[in-house]
């Protein structure tokens, strides 16, 4: 346990994180892109059509992983925000702020693909039920965190305020997740469980699994890349950054 | 033999930065009971930031602050420090007396003082029921000084207390500081320059060019 | 050295802020006028037919109260920030949440309470069916303090910023949505003959929770925003 803590502590030093991220980003995307491609291929071409919905259900393979990511990323942002506020660790501030745009994109994809799916399935592009509304609120929360972070000039104060806002908004996560249980919604209930029996046909699981792992890898790669860039900007005056730049003005 | 009393305020290695740009520090200094530390520096040297860091309003980038031996946190700041900042903290629509009554209600009142007496000491008798927005800048400063007299706090952080005051007013500040120090309190006073201080013990701290 | 007890400090804040509202009592009419204007927008935009307006009436009144509250949020800390009183609050021996709670109470009483008392007027303008007045009033009574408390947290977070009006609204509205859903929703359920007490219980529980947590959160937000 001590070694792990020591490793985290060392990672917090900007040059170390820079090197760490630089090494792992290619691997993350190297895993993510093939898996996502595989998942999409299997989902579109290989897996049999649904007995009820026919082929239009296939958007599930983008929609469901995106939805899971939209919640997962907010949770990751919340954890980093908490660490940033309590222990004032600069790296956590950057990580939390980098989570927001990635999460916002996944949420937007969720809403868009859900809308595309809703038209053939329910006959409407949108409905104001609990699941869709709370997911929309999630998008607003992400955008709010990003907006607040950009609105304050002093960067560390901006990060602290935005992290605080992220923490307040985290109450929305259980609401989104349990909305299908707590309310009568048009959106279907949970069919896939981590533990226990899923009510989804086993033949449909491989592409879903590929997409789930692929999107997670994508998230980590994207997070590392964005944080690395943000750190470079924040530390631009420091010596270790100057040393990175091989071009010397002559 | 009793152990030596810890200084009222002790700062070690204190540094402050904004957006990673250093404003002052690292600084080492202390303020003992019964003395005033004069902090001088040009505009932009970080005097106001120093006062705000010492009051706990801004987070220090590095270093340690101790009030009477205890680490500075919200509780120690609230019970030991009175701040006279650039913005005086009066409500313009309330009268002088109402402002003082509010301060006493929230901060408590120094034993043996009365709001009217503090106003008189500050040269504001007759202005008790005047709304603060009708007072001049100098009179508003005097009201802030009256508040300092009224609320209990051993350490006074005075940010440019002599500004906006005439000779009488400057003498008032010195008189109040003298009284406060004689009672065992301490003060940290910032200014950018040549104001004559009163008959109390002072030391000097110069800020600027990265501090000393 | 004597510390003022908690209750005395709370009372001092209430007294001070009520005095301030009284000295500027002209301003207190503004949220009410704004709400009246918002309600006016709907018949002008949707046509004056009573049947249509009566159907949307509970929502319209709720939206008017919500928006008026949103617009007046900025005044919660603005003057204290500008004259340095807020700085002195941060240095008070009393916990900051006590002072914040006192301010929010006065703010609600001076901005939202007049709106509540004017609900019959607003309801008349938009043809609200008479039997829906009591549920509307109760839902607003539970919901408006909740909106004030949630709004206080957000405005505390943006307190130092110039031109923060739009951003403040964008940050506060997502937090307001659940209150609106349950508040206005309870009146709509009452109109449809469906049970609505559950929504009030939820609002009540949220209000109690907010009374405890929101001042603490707002105090923390103030310290963050002013550092």
Image (spheres, rainbow, N blue to C red):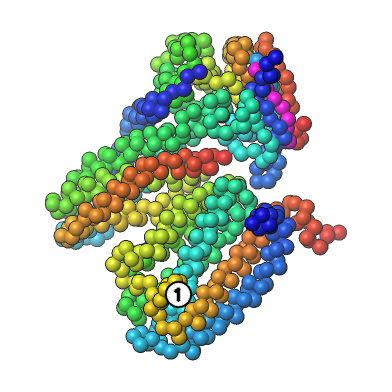
Q: What stretch of residues is rendered in magenta?
A: B26-33
Which residue is located at x 45 percent, y 43 percent? Answer: C217
Which residue is located at x 52 percent, y 85 percent? Answer: A41
Q: Quadrant of residue A229?
A: bottom right
Q: Which class describes the residues within 10 Å of circle 1: few (<14), some (14-19), or many (20+)? A: many
Q: Is residue A2 left or right of residue C93?
A: right
Up/down of A158 relative to A75, above or below: above
SS assignment for the magenta stretch, majority: strand
Q: Is residue C219 left or right of residue A97?
A: left
Up/down of A201 relative to C188, above or below: below
Q: Position of residue A150 (x, y in %)?
A: 55, 53
Give the residue pinned by disc 1: A63
From the image, which quarter does the N terminus of chain B lie in?
Answer: top right
Q: Position of residue B101 (x, y in %)?
A: 42, 20
SS at mark 1?
A: helix
Of residues A83 and C84, the one nearer the viewer is A83
Of residues B92 and A29, the one nearer the viewer is A29
Up/down of A202 relative to B136, above or below: below
């Amino acid at each position: 346990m001590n070694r792990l803590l020591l490793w985290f502590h060392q990672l917090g030093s900007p040059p170390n994180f820079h090197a760490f991220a630089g090494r792992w980003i290619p691997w993350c995307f190297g895993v993510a892109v093939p898996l996502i491609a595989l998942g999409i291929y299997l989902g579109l071409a290989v897996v049999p059509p649904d007995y009820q919905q026919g082929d239009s259900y296939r958007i599930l393979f983008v929609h469901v992983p995106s939805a899971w990511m939209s919640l997962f990323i907010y949770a990751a942002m919340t954890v980093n925000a908490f660490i940033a506020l309590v222990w004032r660790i600069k790296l956590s501030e950057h990580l939390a702020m980098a989570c927001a745009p990635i999460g916002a994109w996944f949420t937007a994809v969720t809403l868009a693909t859900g809308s595309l799916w809703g038209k053939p399935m329910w006959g409407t592009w949108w409905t104001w039920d609990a699941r869709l509304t709370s997911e929309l609120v999630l998008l607003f929360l992400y955008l709010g965190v990003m907006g607040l972070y950009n609105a304050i000039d002093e960067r560390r104060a901006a990060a602290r305020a935005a992290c605080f806002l992220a923490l307040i908004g985290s109450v929305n996560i259980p609401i989104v997740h349990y909305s299908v249980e707590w309310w009568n919604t048009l959106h279907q209930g949970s069919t896939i469980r981590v533990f226990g029996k899923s009510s989804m046909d086993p033949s449909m699981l491989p592409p879903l699994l590929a997409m789930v792992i692929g999107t997670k890898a994508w998230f980590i790669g994207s997070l590392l890349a964005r944080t690395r860039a943000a750190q470079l900007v924040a530390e631009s005056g420091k010596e270790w950054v100057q040393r990175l730049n091989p071009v010397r003005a002559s | 033999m009793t152990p030596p009393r810890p200084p009222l305020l002790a700062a070690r290695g204190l540094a402050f930065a904004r957006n990673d740009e250093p404003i002052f520090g690292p600084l080492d200094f202390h303020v003992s009971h019964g003395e005033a530390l004069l902090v001088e520096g040009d505009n932009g040297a970080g005097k106001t930031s120093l006062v705000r860091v010492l009051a706990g309003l801004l987070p220090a980038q590095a270093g340690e602050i101790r009030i009477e031996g205890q680490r500075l946190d919200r509780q120690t700041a609230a019970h030991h420090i009175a701040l006279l900042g650039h913005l005086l903290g009066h409500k313009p629509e309330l009268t002088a007396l109402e402002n003082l009554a509010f301060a006493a209600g929230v901060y408590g009142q120094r034993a043996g003082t009365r709001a009217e007496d503090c106003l008189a000491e500050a040269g504001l008798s007759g202005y008790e029921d005047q709304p603060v927005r009708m007072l001049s800048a100098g009179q508003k400063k005097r009201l802030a000084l009256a508040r300092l007299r009224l609320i209990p706090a051993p350490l006074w952080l005075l940010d440019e207390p002599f500004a906006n005051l005439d000779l009488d007013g400057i003498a008032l500040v010195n008189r109040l500081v003298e009284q406060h120090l004689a009672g065992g309190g301490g003060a940290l006073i910032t200014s950018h320059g040549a104001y004559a201080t009163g008959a109390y013990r002072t030391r000097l701290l110069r800020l600027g060019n990265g501090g000393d | 050295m004597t510390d003022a007890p908690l209750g005395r400090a709370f009372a001092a804040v209430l007294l001070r802020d009520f005095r301030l509202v009284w000295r500027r009592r002209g301003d207190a009419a503004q949220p009410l006028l704004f709400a009246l204007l918002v309600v006016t927008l709907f018949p002008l935009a949707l046509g004056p037919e009573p049947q249509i307006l009566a159907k949307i009436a509970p929502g319209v009144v709720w939206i008017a109260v919500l928006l008026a509250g949103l617009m007046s949020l900025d005044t919660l800390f603005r003057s204290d920030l500008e004259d340095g009183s807020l700085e002195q609050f941060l240095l008070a021996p009393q916990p900051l949440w006590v002072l914040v709670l006192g301010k929010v109470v006065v703010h609600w009483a001076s901005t939202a309470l007049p709106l509540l008392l004017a609900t019959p007027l607003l309801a008349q303008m938009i043809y609200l069916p008479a039997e829906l007045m009591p549920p509307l009033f109760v839902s607003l009574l539970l919901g408006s303090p909740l909106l004030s408390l949630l709004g206080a947290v957000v405005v505390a977070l943006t307190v130092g910023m110039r031109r923060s009006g739009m951003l403040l609204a964008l940050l506060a509205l997502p937090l307001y949505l659940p209150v609106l859903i349950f508040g206005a929703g309870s009146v709509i359920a009452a109109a449809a003959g469906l049970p609505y007490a559950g929504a009030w219980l939820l609002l009540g529980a949220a209000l109690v929770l907010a009374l405890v947590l929101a001042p603490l959160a707002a105090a923390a937000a103030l310290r963050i925003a002013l550092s």
